[in-house]
Every structure is written in C-alpha cells, then in structure tokens.
Image (tube, rainbow, N blue to C red):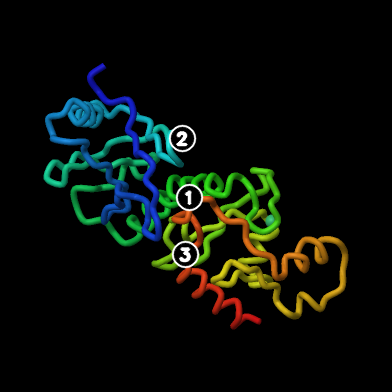
Amino acid sequence: MTAALSILTTYTSDGARAPYEDAVGGDGLLRYKFQGNREHYTNVGLQRAFELRLPLMWFFGIRQGLYLPFFPVWIVAVEVEQSQVAVALDEAQRHLRIDGPVSLIERGYSERITKQRLHQPVFRQRVIQAYETSCAMCHLRHRSLLDAAHIIPDRETHGVPAISNGMALCKIHHAAYDENILGVRPDYVIEVRSDILEERDGPMLRYGLQAMHDLRLTLPRRRMDRPDHNLLEERYERFRAAG
Ligand SMILES: [Zn+2]
C-alpha cells in the first residue's frame, strides 16, 4: 500500500472564472498539483502509482462535502519542476506521447476527451446542485429531465464551464433557450420571441413556452452562483438579433 489510491479536487466556488486549478496541458491532459512539498507522503504515493502504472480514482468536488468520482484514471507523467502530475482519463489519453511534441489532431482529440469525460459532467452536477435540482424557468424538479445550459456556448473561448455561465433548465427550456425561442434579460427576466407569442397551439406552446414570458428566473441562493451579468447581456443581444 505505498501507492496513492485516489486523488481529490476540493470544491471551490468559482465566480466567473473556470473552476479548475488543475489545468489542461498543451497535450490536452489534465494536471493535478502536488499537495505541499514534493517529499510529502501523498506526493510520493503519486510517484509510486505512476511507476507501477496503477489505476486511481479521482474525486471531484461538486459542492462542499459532495464529490463526483472518476475511475479508472492513470498518472502518465510526473512533472517535478511544475509540482504536478499528468492524468489520463482513458486508454487513448494513456498512450498519448507526452515527452515530445503532440500533433494538432492528437491534442484536439485529447482535449475533447477531457471536456467530455470530466469538465461536462462536473459542470452539469455543479449547476444542477446550485439550482437545487430545479429548472430556473418552470421549477420542474426531475433530475433526469434537467440540463446544465451554457449561457455562452462551451465551444467559444469565454464559454467557460463555471456555474455563473450556466443555468439549470429542463430539456424543453434548454432547447428553447439554445434556439433563441426565449431569451433571458440581464435583469433575469425571461422574454419569449414575439412570433412565438403570437402562435396558437396546444398546452406545450401555451403553458410550456408562452407562459414563461415576463417571468423572473429562480436563482441560486448564493450570489456568486448566479448567472454573470455580462455573459447574460452578450447572449441576450444574440437573442434580440435572432428575433
Ligand atoms: Zn423548465
């Protein structure tokens, strides 16, 4: 039992910045920082897990005292000078060359794995927790019908996976928001697009969409978890342009 079994990233509230101090390296692999000095037994354990090529579990903080587990993960490099290790989230990342130049294709693939395997599930859980498992628009409380919607999409550079760039929305309101069928003003009031307001149809249109017009979002209790004003404004401008 000389090698580390697990690593742990504690929850830190993130405000408008990306919540990961465990940054992604130039090869698309996540880095995990040493705790304290290099000789500390936890860091020696990481070194040992690397040498023995042992799988580990990574516990990722979703909120105070609540973690999302990822396993198996592997330490594929120890970078002493930067006080960190490189962590592979799957077999493909495990066999990536990290001691030499990585091609653009390899890097892009590796970054996508990191996003899909870790950033997206962590973002989803953090946002849904912050909104107490409830749609910010209609209050629906079925976890399996809820998504973490991005205000600025994550394919854009400032579309960071931070709670303040997200909202917990049910599937229909998430899709309607992405399609600019409804928008959210920077003062958190929902606007339904004018042509949609004029349509006549069944209960999903009337109660599911039109009835959201002029309602205010139900927001997380903690101010820092609420949608960022500037991000909302930027996104609202796009909604206006679409109308
Ligand atoms: Zn909803």
Q: Distance between the residues labelled 2 and 3?
A: 24 Å
Q: Quadrant of residue 1?
A: top left
Which amino acid type is shown beneath numbered disc 1? Phe
Q: Which is more toward the observer, 46 or 16?
A: 16
Which amino acid type is shown beneath numbered disc 3? Asp
Mark 1 highlights which residue? 123
Which amino acid type is shown beneath numbered disc 2? Leu
Q: Within the displayed image, which quadrant is ligand 1 positioned in?
A: bottom right
Element assignment for label 2 = strand
Above or below: residue 67 compared with residue 12: above
Q: Where is residue 185 in the image (x, y as percent from the top left)?
A: 58, 72
Q: Which residue is drawn at 26% across and 43% down?
A: 86
Q: Which is more toward the observer, 82 or 77?
A: 82
Q: Earlier in the sequence, mark 2 or mark 1?
A: 2
Depth check, mark 2 against mark 1: the one in front is 2
Element assignment for label 3 = loop
Mark 3 highlights which residue? 228
Q: Position of residue 24 (x, y in %)?
A: 31, 52
Q: Residues within 10 Å of mark 2 (few under 14, many from 20)?
A: some
Q: Which residue is drawn at 19% across and 31% down?
A: 43
Q: Evaluate if marks 2 and 3 touch, with contact meaning CB atoms under 8 Å apart.
A: no
Location of the C terminus (image quadrant)? bottom right
Please give the label number shown on residue 66. 2
> Taking 84 as reference, is 233 left or right?
right
Q: Where is residue 118 in the image (x, y as percent from the top left)?
A: 43, 45
Q: Evaluate if marks 2 and 1 touch, with contact meaning CB atoms under 8 Å apart.
A: no
